Image: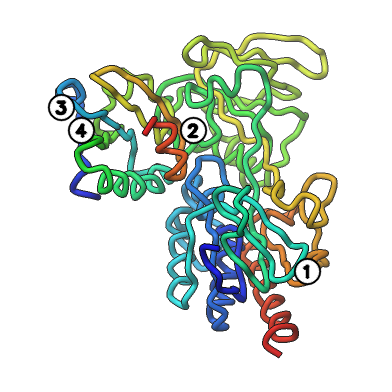
Amino acid sequence: MSDPKIHDVIILGSGPAGLTAAIYTARANLEPLVIEGEPSSTGDQPGGQLMLTTEVENFPGFPEGIMGPELMMNFRNQASRFGATFDTAKASKVDFSARPYEIWTGDPEAAEPTYLAHSVIVSTGATALTLDVPNEQRLMGHGVSTCATCDGFFFRDHDIAIVGGGDSAMEEATFLTRFAKSVTVLVRREELRASQIMQDRALANEKIRFLWNTEVVDVVGEHSVEKLIVRNNKTDETSDLEVTGLFVAIGHRPNTDLFEGQLEMKDNGYLVTDAPSSLTNIDGVFACGDVQDDSYRQAITAAGSGCTAALDAERWLEANIHA
Amino acid sequence: MSDKVSTLTDTTFDEVVNSASAPVVVDFWAEWCGPCKMIAPILDEIADEQGDAISINKLNVDENPATAQRFGVMSIPTILVFRDGELDKRIVGAKGKSALMAEMGF
């Protein structure tokens, strides 16, 4: 075993939930180890989904707003200041069937786990969904993107499209007008899910137009995106949409594959907690943040639930391990 | 940034890529790109470990749009690997160190 010590708390994931749990458990002298994830461009990287955003305007305490990556760097520094330690890896397997709990990083087939823990806080978050149409994956990075802030720059004076009707779609559409000649928002329904302020901003933007009841059937292009084939789901009519970029912002799925068969989940894959606490069906395993929240999904609600999980873990350790 | 990592520009790109005997890795990045910042320390580490065996370089797409356009870079981070001056590998999106090394073919 690479690390034979039994940790009091291991935190899986390092978005607002995981890092808030790290700050609280570190201040309680529990020396949390955060398995923070690996770099990626899809939402499960260290720092979580905010690493792919620009300005965050609704996190309390920053009246002028703050950049997402900077906010997450602050969270991490704050946790580290009180003694949290980090492993820049992804958990590849967990075994919650016996105590201490076992966690693997790297090769999940390895005989010995990488870490042992008395308690585990699960905050692995959620990952951006893709459309699952034929040529989407092949053209990913060649006109198809799930990260407007990363790739918008390459579409200066292009006509582009974005799929989605929620807050992130509106935010990204608005952001993309800094570069693009026009942004067509493809909405599957007849109305937007986005909050009023985000809707108003997008609807008032002259460069943005909306196509309602519209779904993407395929992405066309040999080396990069040349056009989309879209279908009106009311009339069933199919047409071409001449764009060179396709941004996808249709929501997220929870990162819970790792816990299949061990932690109780809803049909949609989100973890079940004993609300208002963070307790899962396994004693000593707690869940917080987007991995258990299919309803609010905000940085501040994630942070709040991270605090709840830390306090639950502290109490549990006090009653079961340190008693 | 590691002193083993060099900065390329539109002007110096061809000379560096064509004259190198070692494989040349070019990281297309920009200041405003979060995932680019995540892989920067990984490339520093690889550069320090590999020494002269691999040439690791960075190209800022804001300042050098011509090279980015020439190679059809439409998403960053994009990492291109050249062997004997020829484009050999293209990696789009941030990755962890082991995945990155494997995809670059090292």
State the CA–CA distance, disc 4 to disc 2.
28 Å
Q: Chain of mark 4?
A: B
Instruction: Please check whether the numbered discs 1 and 3 fall on a single chain.
Output: no
Q: Label 4 crowding class (10 Å Cα cut-off): few <14, some 14-19, many 20+?
A: many
Q: Chain of mark 1?
A: A
Q: Tell me the number on the disc at residue B44.
A: none
On screen, residue B47 versus residue A78, left or right, reads left
State the CA–CA distance, disc 1 to disc 3.
57 Å
> Where does the image place residue B56, in percent across and percent down from the top left?
26, 37
Badge 2 element: helix
Q: Tell me the number on the disc at residue B12.
A: 3
Residue type, label 2: Leu
Badge 4 element: strand
> Where does the image place residue A54, in percent across and percent down from the top left?
47, 47
Q: Nearer the viewer, residue A100 or A48?
A: A100
Badge 1 element: loop
Residue at the bottom extreme? A323
Q: Nearer the viewer, residue A131 or A172?
A: A131
State the CA–CA distance, disc 4 to disc 3.
6 Å
The residue singled out by tag 2 in the image is A176
The residue singled out by tag 4 in the image is B8
Instruction: Please check whether the numbered discs 4 and 2 fall on a single chain.
Output: no
